[in-house]
């Protein structure tokens, strides 16, 4: 830090938080306005200062001095967004601009002063250009270093080269922008920056630390930090205007190829590539068309051209596939075409898949599916995403091809089957409960996620279930036992609750191969021909023997397991849903997932 301070030109917009509120939110800056942060004033308008309001006042005191005060909350994001056009206007005149904070930006003064005819002429040119472009008043200060230039900008002053130390010497220590340090220095008798700069640097470091040493250098005019200039965003958008409206697919294909090559060359010139492409078109009648294409790899020139051609083909022909209405064709040919690269990243910033996920075969499939989307719409091609849920239909979400694959419900996908050593098998036909987060009376069957009281249970605390059809004579199904009261029972209950899955009532694996979009009505009867019913205590009236789906012929049930109950949204009567699921195997080898809800049997899914 022994270099010479750089000659710096700094542009400052007074009361910028107030002006940003006017630009973004429409708050009139000509009225008494204050911007508050942590219940204190951080900025105020000129009318508010005339009423005696100053920075640092509390809200109540400020409103006491000016009852008709307009209060605005401090929003750094709003200030930065509103200041971006000002920075862009400065960059139209000079290069290498550093944004100090919203409302102030700096640049090296040497370049503008040389090609604009001196420092004073450069300052006048920048202030005038910002006023004409953004309708914003500003002031410029020039001095050695950013800190001194900022103080000079508040006075609209140009400090002569080498005169920065004398310029700073008479400033109060509050100009450092460190309230705690300024208060301590004043109590020590140091009131100006000149007094502070006269202190030995070693003593300042030992007494005030590194931040105090940095402030000591600023007070002495030794601000030798180089400017961290920002790089202006590159103009990557390519546009083509056509004298003759393009209304044929072959002409559109030629236009797409030319414009795609131009975009790819522009991106390559900056070492960039894009993963999303916006295609915009304007017809001769002023109709605007827009579509965004997404790709999980880098879009090459051929890929860009294909997507533009497919999109123009879909717009101009207005064709779609089977079913659905034909989309409206543009009323006139295309006279302007724009390609807007989005998702821009460094060309070496996307690593291909280790196992060839971005290979030629996958690329061809992606191009084919993307073309279908361009003709039929994004929702025409979808993929399945697994997530959490209690039923197979709840665990699957269909997302358009190329969109982010996010599950509809949080939670892990279906759990793998437990090993025999981890959990003993439960015979088919047994009553299988699921975890409940609410207490269940001793002796009741665990499984319904509900806080409603259950009927009285047998004194033994065990609810036996019926054996499955085809089971060995005398084979008893595993009962569901709720631990009775007592220390040992409570410990066992707590241990079982900790091992429960995050979705109580979820169907155990394996998952069904086909989930029906709409469940089919079915009828389940026992060996005597009576309907099989499930009570509120999950007791099955008899072993299921025959299944009839719709108007089909009855099929013999050779094995069954269940029920797996679910009582969802019991706290909202209009949305409450209570049902029980069964797995059944038929004599012809088929396996189905059944559900009974409100006394009606339904076929929800089919197993392989």
Image: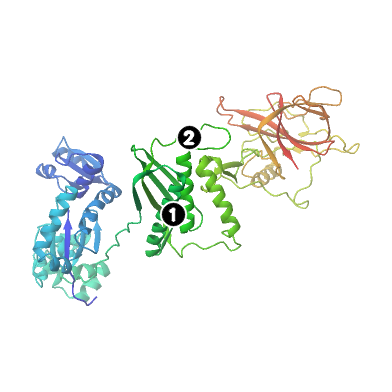
Relative image position of residue 411 (x, y in whole percent): 58, 46
Residue placed at 41% from the left, 51% from the top? 255
Image quadrant where residue 593 sits: top right
**26 to the left or right of 124:** right
Image quadrant where residue 154 sits: bottom left
**59 to the left or right of 388:** left
Residue placed at 59% from the left, 52% from the top? 365
Coloration of the structure image: rainbow
Q: How far is the residue under mark 2 from the one under mark 1?
A: 25 Å
Q: Dot 2: what SS?
A: loop
Q: Dot 1: what SS?
A: helix
Relative image position of residue 134 (x, y in whole percent): 19, 49
| N-term mark: 2 or 1 | 1
Image quadrant where residue 440 sits: top right
Relative image position of residue 576 (x, y in whole percent): 59, 28
The image shows residue 150, relative to residue 450, as above or below, that is below
The image shows residue 491, relative to residue 446, as above or below, that is below
* View extreme (right): residue: 473
Q: Nearer the viewer, residue 58 or 552?
A: 552
In the rendered image, is residue 41 in sight? no
Is the residue marked by circle 1 packed among few (<14), some (14-19), or many (20+) residues within 10 Å? some
Which label sits on residue 257? 1
Residue placed at 52% from the left, 44% from the top? 373
**460 to the left or right of 175:** right
Read off the residue under disc 2: 327
Is the residue marked by circle 2 packed among few (<14), some (14-19), or many (20+) residues within 10 Å? some
Number of marks in picture: 2
In the rendered image, is residue 368 in sight? yes
Relative image position of residue 61 (x, y in whole percent): 18, 41
Point out the image quarter for the C terminus: top right
| Number of the front mark, 2 or 1 | 1
């Amino acid at each position: 830090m022994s270099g010479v301070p750089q000659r710096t030109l700094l542009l400052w917009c007074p009361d910028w938080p107030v002006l940003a509120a006017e630009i973004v939110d429409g708050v009139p800056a000509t009225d008494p306005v204050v911007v508050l942060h942590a219940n204190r004033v951080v900025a105020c308008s000129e009318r508010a200062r005339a009423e005696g309001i100053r920075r640092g006042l509390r809200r109540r005191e400020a409103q006491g001095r000016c009852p008709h005060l307009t209060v605005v909350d401090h929003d750094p994001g709003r200030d930065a967004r509103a200041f971006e056009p000002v920075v862009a206007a400065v960059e139209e005149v000079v290069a290498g601009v550093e944004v100090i904070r919203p409302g102030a930006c700096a640049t090296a003064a040497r370049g503008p002063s040389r090609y604009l005819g001196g420092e004073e002429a450069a300052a006048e040119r920048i202030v005038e250009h910002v006023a004409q472009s953004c309708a914003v008043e500003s002031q410029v200060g020039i001095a050695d270093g950013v800190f001194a230039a900022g103080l000079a900008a508040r006075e609209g002053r140009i400090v002569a080269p080498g005169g920065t130390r004398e310029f700073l010497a008479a400033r109060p220590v509050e100009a450092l922008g460190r309230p705690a340090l300024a208060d301590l220095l004043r109590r020590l008798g140091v009131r100006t920056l000149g007094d502070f700069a006269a202190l030995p640097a070693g003593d300042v470091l030992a007494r005030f630390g590194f931040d105090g040493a940095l402030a000591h250098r600023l007070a002495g005019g030794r601000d030798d930090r180089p400017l961290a200039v920002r790089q202006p965003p590159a103009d990557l958008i390519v546009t083509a205007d056509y004298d003759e409206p393009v209304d044929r697919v072959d002409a559109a294909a030629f236009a797409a190829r030319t414009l795609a090559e131009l975009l790819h060359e522009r991106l390559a010139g900056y070492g960039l590539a894009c993963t999303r492409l916006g295609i915009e078109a304007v017809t001769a009648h002023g109709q605007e068309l827009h579509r965004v294409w997404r790709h999980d790899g880098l879009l090459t020139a051929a890929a860009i051209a294909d997507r533009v051609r497919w999109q123009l083909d879909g717009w101009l022909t207005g064709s779609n596939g089977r079913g659905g209405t034909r989309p409206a064709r543009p009323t006139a040919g295309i006279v302007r075409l724009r390609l807007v690269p989005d998702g821009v990243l460094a060309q070496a910033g996307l690593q291909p898949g280790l196992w060839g996920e971005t290979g030629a075969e996958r690329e061809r499939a992606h191009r084919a599916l993307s073309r279908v989307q361009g003709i039929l719409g994004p929702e025409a091609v979808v993929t399945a995403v697994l997530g959490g849920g209690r039923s197979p239909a709840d665990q699957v979400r269909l997302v358009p091809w190329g969109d982010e694959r996010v599950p509809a419900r949080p939670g892990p996908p279906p759990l793998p089957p437990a090993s025999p050593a981890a959990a003993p098998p439960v015979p088919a036909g047994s009553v299988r409960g699921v975890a409940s987060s609410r207490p269940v009376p001793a002796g009741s069957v665990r499984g319904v996620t509900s806080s409603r009281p259950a009927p009285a249970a047998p004194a033994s605390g065990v609810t036996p279930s019926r054996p499955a059809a085809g089971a060995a004579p005398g084979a008893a199904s595993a009962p569901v036992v709720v631990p009775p009261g007592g220390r040992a029972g409570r410990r066992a209950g707590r241990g079982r609750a900790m091992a429960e899955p995050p979705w109580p009532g979820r169907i155990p694996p394996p998952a069904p191969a086909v989930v029906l979009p709409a469940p089919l009505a079915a009828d389940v009867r026992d060996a005597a021909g009576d309907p099989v019913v499930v009570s509120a205590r999950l007791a099955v009236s008899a072993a299921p023997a025959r299944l009839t789906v719709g108007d089909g012929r009855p099929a013999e049930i050779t094995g069954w397991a269940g029920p797996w109950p679910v009582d969802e949204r019991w706290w909202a009567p209009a949305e409450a849903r209570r049902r029980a699921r069964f797995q059944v195997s038929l004599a012809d080898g088929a396996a189905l997932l059944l559900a009974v809800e409100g006394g009606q049997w339904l076929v929800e899914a089919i197993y392989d």
